[in-house]
Every structure is written in C-alpha cells, then in structure tokens.
Image (cartoon, rainbow, N blue to C red):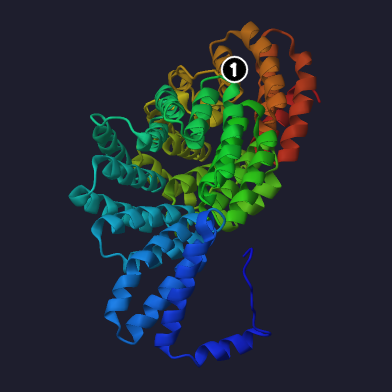
Amino acid sequence: MAGQHEYAFAHALVREVAYGQLPRRERATRHVAAARWLETNVGERADDLAETLAHHYTTALDLARGYGDAELADSLTAPALRHLRRAGVRAERFDLARGAEHFARGLALAADEHERAELLSLHAHGLIGLGRIEEAVAEFAQAEEILRRCGSDLEVAQALFGLSGALSRLNDPGRLAAAEAAQRLLEDVEPSAEHVRLWTRLAVTKMLLEDHEAILFWAERAIELAERLGMPEAARALEWRGWARAALGDRGGVEDMRRAVDASDAQGDDGHNVASFAANLAMAVLQYEGPQVALSDLLEAEEVARSRGAEEVVTFARAVAIIMRVNAGDGDTASHELTELPGSSLESACNVVDLMNLRATKAFSSSARGDSAGADVDWLRAQAEASNQTEAAAISLVACGLVDIAGGDAGRGARLLARCAALPRVHHSADYAAMLPGAVRAALAIGDVTLAERLLGDVESLVPLLAQPRASGLTLLAEARDEHEAAAAGFPDAAAGWHDFGVPYEEGHALLGQCPCLAALGRAPEAAAPLAAARKIFARLGAKPALEETEAALAGLGF
C-alpha cells in the first residue's frame, strides 16, 4: 500500500509457528485490528479486498466464539456478513464455486430474516451456475417464503423469477406459475432502478413461451428505463432484445448480443452471466450462419465458462456443440462425445431440458445412421409425453416419432408427431424447425399427407434456420401432391440452401428427392448427377438407410 511499510516472514512455516503461539484472544484482537485498519485505509478499494476483510472478520468471529467472548462475537457478525456478501459478489465474477462458498458462510451467520433471504437468492443463483439445480430451487423457494413475510413486492418478484428460471431447467410446469406470479407483483409498483433487472427477468421468462414480441417489449422497457435513470447500460436486457430481434428476422440483433457480452464483462458481471451471454450469442449466430460457423462461437463460450467456473454453461455448451456437430455432419466426433461427460453431467445436475435435447439428437442421429436408439428413447418418450415446454417436447417427440416409424411402429410414431404438431407456438421454434424435414418425410413415408401438412403448419421463415426447413417441407409436400414441376424446381434450391447453411444430411435428402419427380416428368437421366452427389454425402455421414435408398435409385437408372 502506497506510503506504508510492509513486512513479511522469511518462510511460510515461520509465519504459521509464530501465529500458532499466539493465544486465541490475541489472535482475534489482531484480526479485528487488521480488518479495521484496512477498512480505514483502502477507501474505494474495499471491494478489491473484500475477501481479505471477510477472512479477518470471520476468523476473529470463530476465535471469539471458541474462547467464549459472546459480546465480541456479536459485534463481529455484521461486518463479517457485509464482507462475505461483497466477497461472494466479487469472487463469482471469476470463480462461481468460490463465490458460492462465501454466500454459504454468510448464510450460516445470518440471523436476520431479510438478510438471510437475500443471501439465499445470491447463493441459489450461484448454484444454478454450478449445475446444482435442485438445491437452487429449494433456496429460491425459501427466499420467496421469507420475503413474503418481511420483504417488498419487488423482492418477492425477484425470488419468483429466480425460482422460475431454476424450475425451467427441470422441465417443471411450475415455472410458468412462478413467472406469472412475479409479473402480477410488478403491475402496481412505480418503476424504479430495480425494475431494470426485474423487467429483464420478465423478458427471459417469455422465452418459455417462445414469445419474441413480448421478450422485445420487456427488454426495451428495461433498456429505456436504465437510460432515463442514468444507469449503466442494461447488458442483460440488451442481450434479450438482441435475441428477440434476431429471432424476428432482424440480423442487427446479433450485434446487440455481441455488445451485451462486452458490456457484461466490462461491468464486472458474474461469471455465469458472462458465459451465458456468450453461449446465447452462439445460438443467435446459428440462426443465420448455420452450425459450422456457430460452433466456433460456442467453443469460445465454453472456454469463457470454464475459466469462470460456470459449470452449467460448460455442460450446456458441450451438449449443444454435439448437436451442432451432428447437424454439421461431423458424426464421428459427435458420436464419440455423446457417450462422454455431457449426459452424465446433465443427469447429475437434474437439468432435464438440456438432457432431453441431447438425447433427442442422439436418437435422431441413430435413426439417420440406421442404428438402435437404445434405452434412452424410452426415457425421452416419457419426458416428451409429460412435458409442456414446447422447445424440449417438440424435438423429443419428433425424434421418438422417427425412431418408432423407422422401427415399424407407424401408429405410435404418427401419434407422437401429431402431438408435436399440436404444441403451442411450435411452428415458431427454431429447434423444432431443425428436425422438421425429417418429420415431414416420416409422415409421407407412412402415407399421411395430412399429418405432414400439420407438421409444416405456418412455420415462420424469418431466419435461415427456419426458412430452409420450410422450403424443404413445401417441396416434399409438392412431390406428395404430384406437383412434379414445382418439386423438380424446389429440390435443387433446397439442396443449395442446405449446402450454404452447412447441413449436409438435409442437402443429401434434397438431392435424393429430385429423382422421383424427375422420373415422373420423363427426365430420369437428369437425376444421375444429384443422386451421385447424395451418395457421396450419405456415405461420408454413415447414413445407411438414406445411402441404401440412393443406391437403389441409382441402380434403377442403370448406374
């Protein structure tokens, strides 16, 4: 410290021996003296030294309790709690586990109900980042219960939003009730600085309904309020405004999200939020650039999460990277990774939604390769049937439906696909759209054109991730309705689109699809080149059923 003398022991062992020779009362007195001297001299650097201050106060408190000085112990509880909270907030920027330890220690000391509720919410947020979802649910619920007795409506709403976020990871239907209860509490309260955070949380809950207009509305309200109050840029609201803009077809939303990542990091946000922003950015890039481009952004997000100890985001990023690799055609790497850590990590965290997405991708990949989908499908089918969360339920129902139809149980497969088509706002879901062409092909394979039409529905085409599946689906329907000229023109366009978007499996199917419509038009020889290209793709991907179909078509042409 500038202007001060500094002394140090020549060896750590000497220090420990000297320290151990001091009586506990003397040690406690010196820890308190050190802490108070630091508080007097550090000024604006108090946050930088929060962990050191917390160490001195908590150590002195433990020592005072140890030798029975209740009066000193009582006097140290408040400063110990204050600095443990500050230390936790600071530490979770770089090490979520360390931050959670500080909050947990604070909880052990907190007697005041209101203070305890605040620490419960902080600790629960850290637990989500560490992948300990069920514990987080319990602590948010405790915080809500306490705050209903001694807190404000805004504080209760904050706890409810936290509870909703944790429940959403468990695929628990109570998540919507918690979010709706929080929204009701905000309706009659004059907007304040706290509303910036709460309106942002409200925008996040609208993700559960895939309601991008509502996300945009609440995020923009939060941003405008922060500007009006002269607050720092509302990074999290900016992130969700960007997400909604991108989903609604405005590519500028991706730039909003890039700004949000930078702003969050610059403002000292906790490691979980910074890593989550980066992962969500990768998902927005996916909508426009495809899985191969988005994968590099996602791997960067995984590295950020790993460096900050944000285990939930690490696991999420690894799981989504597998899904992207499957879609990008890197099946061998994805197949190897599907048997590794992500599934077990998601299971241990009880993160049902992300586990459903991962197992749905595994089932889809197995079906495309002609392999057995394994016992995971039984679990996935049960979860999908019970779920009312559109994103997770949709891709799970499609994946299980494809497995059933491929396995000869057309009736059950058709029922699962029909249930998927009836989910609320399913046709606005990017995850569903990614599996849509396969679902339409499966419905047409069992002769159910009506089901194929229902699956396609009014799928939006605002971004390439939605436009490409819609183009393929419409072309497949044109062929099924014997509109051969339209199909013959549509399949090459679809193949080119999938090629540019970096999804070879669907590119191969669009090439293969040209054969029957060209044959019906008396132009069968023209199918040779696209069929040869499809054979090359399916052989590289190990997609045995599609490869066999392609080779049969080539044999029919005499090749």
For label 1, the crowd category at 10 Å Cα-Cα, with few meaning under 14, some 14 to 19 and many 20 or more, is some
| Residue 279 appears anywhere in the view | no
Q: Amino acid at mark 1?
A: Ala
Res 454 quadrant in image: top left
Q: Secondary structure at mark 1?
A: helix
Q: Residue at x 34, y 33 (%)?
A: 192
Residue found at the far bottom of this picture: 21
Q: Position of residue 149 (x, y in %)?
A: 18, 51
Q: Position of residue 34 (x, y in %)?
A: 49, 73
Q: Is residue 528 left or right of residue 501?
A: right
Residue 19 higher or lower than 305, as above or below: below
- Tally of numbered tags: 1
Q: Position of residue 112 (x, y in %)?
A: 25, 61
The image quadrant where one finds the N terminus is: bottom right
Q: Residue at x 32, y 77 (%)?
A: 72
The image quadrant where one finds the C terminus is: top right
Camera-side residue of 245 and 232: 232
Residue 22 higher or lower than 34, as above or below: below
| Residue 3 appears anywhere in the view | yes
Q: Residue at x 59, y 41 (%)?
A: 278
Q: Is residue 284 left or right of residue 356?
A: right
Q: Which residue is mark 1?
A: 471
Q: Is residue 227 left or right of residue 322?
A: left
Camera-side residue of 116 and 527: 116
Q: Position of residue 4 (x, y in %)?
A: 62, 69
Res 307 quadrant in image: bottom right
Q: Residue at x 20, y 48 (%)?
A: 148
Residue found at the far front of this picture: 3
